[in-house]
Structure formats: structure tokens, C-alpha cells
Amino acid sequence: MGEATVKTLEDQTATPSPMVDEAVYVPTRSRLQQLRAPRHPRIWFEILLIAVSYWTYSLIRNAVPEQKAQALRNADWIWNAERSLGLAVEQSVNHAVNSVTWLIVSMNYYYATLHFIVTIGVLVWLYRWHPGRYAAARLVLFATTGVALVGYYLYPLAPPRLMNGQNFVDTVLVHQTWGSMASGNLKNMSNQYAAMPSMHIGWSLWCGIIVFAVATAPWAKILGLLYPVATLVVIVATANHFWLDAVGGMICLAFGFAASYVWYQAMPHRLPKTVTGARGGLRLRTPARD
């Protein structure tokens, strides 16, 4: 009988497989996933959206009943609450800064202009240099502003400068500067009793956080941090807001970030800087096997 031959795994030689160039199809994303996916913003759409949104915001804000009596009662309550906490600093800051003419005049113009200029500037910067993060950051701003309208309706509040018997200085009137839409000849164009929450703080803090989180230059990050702090000083010094109005603006901003996170599943700065790739399914080629 011949000697048995046993083949082991080591003795077996693998049969070479032909070169294969396979294509694996990744299923088309759902409609919801497509809507959530970062995409290149379109300039005409963004300009139209911002213009219509701000017009709508102004229309609703100014259409809210002024409720003067209730707004003044709420202002008295906030002022008394701050005094009971030993944190009623608005009047001292208002009088101290008002005594330095060049400073208070600068703050009047700051209050009237930078609120819009800086916010639009940050939006343009994101659109140009961080298009993948633009939509998520914009949603934060829009959601923040939208929920603020609810605050204006539910809690009418007079600014300190309109309180009775508290001796706050309306710095725009005293120094005859072009400034607040709620002072002087422009007062009839804006609801004067919509001080809570402060969107000067909501928007400036949005600018500061976005710049700090996204910018790479240290000086830009520092400016991002300083801007909302300076805005807080300005709104108090000009007697347009209590510091508690700033807290209200921060709460609205927190809501805005939460809404954006729920939709995009990430904070704006965690999204890709740029947008690449096409919509729909992707065809991925696997490497050829030996």
C-alpha cells in the first residue's frame, strides 16, 4: 500500500483571484439627511432670507402691544429685585459714564450701529470663509431672535431710562446724538417697552462665541470675547437695559444653539469648514485584490 499523502493548509496554494474592481453603492440619503447636510449657501437666497426675516422680526416686535403700565411695573420689580441682591449697578454706571461726554457719545453710536454691522460682518465672514458652518450658525441666530419675540410679548419691560422717579439719564436725548430707535424723534418707530430679552446681548454674544470658536488668529479670538463684554457695558451705561435683560438674551441664545444642535447634530464649529461632494448616493470603489 502506498504511503498516504496528507495535505496540510500550509501545503495548499491559494488560487490567484482575478483583478476585481468592485463598486459599492451607498444608498441615497433620506430627504431629512439631505436637508440637514451642510451645503454651499446661495448669496441671493441669504440676502433675501435675512432681509425678510429682519423685516418680519421688526414688524412683530413693534406690533406687540406696548402695555406701558405693565412694562413700568415690571421695570420697578426688576430694579427692586436687583437692589435687594445688592446688584443694582445700572444707575451708577449710567451717571458715571454720562459725565465723560466723548465716552457716552461713542457708546450711543456703538449701541445704534455695531449691533447690525458686526452681526452682518460675521455672517459675511462665515459665508465667505466657512460655508460649511454658515447655515448652522445662521440657524442659531434666527432661533435666538425668534424666541426673543415671545419674551417681548409675554413680558413687556420698560428700559431704565423710561422709569418714573429713578433719575436715569437718556443719553441719546441729553447729548442729542443719533442713536436709539426708541429715543427722540425715532421713538414712534420702535416698541419702547420691549427691553427683555436684550438682543444686543443675544446677537453680540453669538458673534463672540462664533468668532472665538471658529477663528484661528489669537487676536480675533480675543476680540470675539471682548465684543459682548463691551456691549454689556454699553447697554447699561446708556440706560437702555438692565443687566438682567442681558441674562434673558443669554437664555435665548442658549435656546438658539440647542435648536441648531438638534437639527444639525453638531455645534456649528464642529461641522466641516467647507462643503464637498454631491447630493444623493455615492459610488465608492474598493481597491483591487491580489
Image: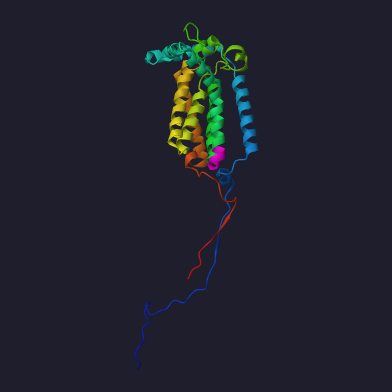
Residue displayed at 39% across by 13% down: 83
Residue 187: name its quadrant. top right
Q: Is residue 135 above or below residue 111?
A: below
Q: Is residue 228 magenta?
A: no
Q: Picture coordinates of residue 170 (x, y %)?
A: 52, 11
The image shows a total of numbered marks equal to 0
Q: Is residue 239 visible?
A: no
Q: Is residue 199 above or below residue 43?
A: above
Residue displayed at 56% across by 39% down: 128
Q: Picture coordinates of residue 211 (x, y %)?
A: 48, 34
Q: Is residue 269 above or below residue 181?
A: below
Outermost residue on the front side: it is: 102
Q: Is residue 192 above or below residue 146?
A: above
The rendered magenta stretch, by its main secondary structure, is classed as helix
Could you tell me which quadrant the N terminus lies in? bottom left
Judging depth in this view, the residue of 48 and 177 nearest the camera is 177
Where are the magenta residues, as a range? Answer: 126-132
Q: Picture coordinates of residue 37 (x, y %)?
A: 55, 45
Residue 23: name its quadrant. bottom right
The colouring scheme, among rainbow, by chain, secondary structure or one colour, is: rainbow
Left or right relative to 280: residue 212: left
Judging depth in this view, the residue of 258 and 99 nearest the camera is 99
Left or right relative to 210: residue 66: right
Q: Is residue 97 visible?
A: yes
Q: Picture coordinates of residue 31 (x, y %)?
A: 59, 46
Judging depth in this view, the residue of 236 and 58 nearest the camera is 236
Outermost residue on the top side: it is: 165
Residue displayed at 63% across by 30% down: 51
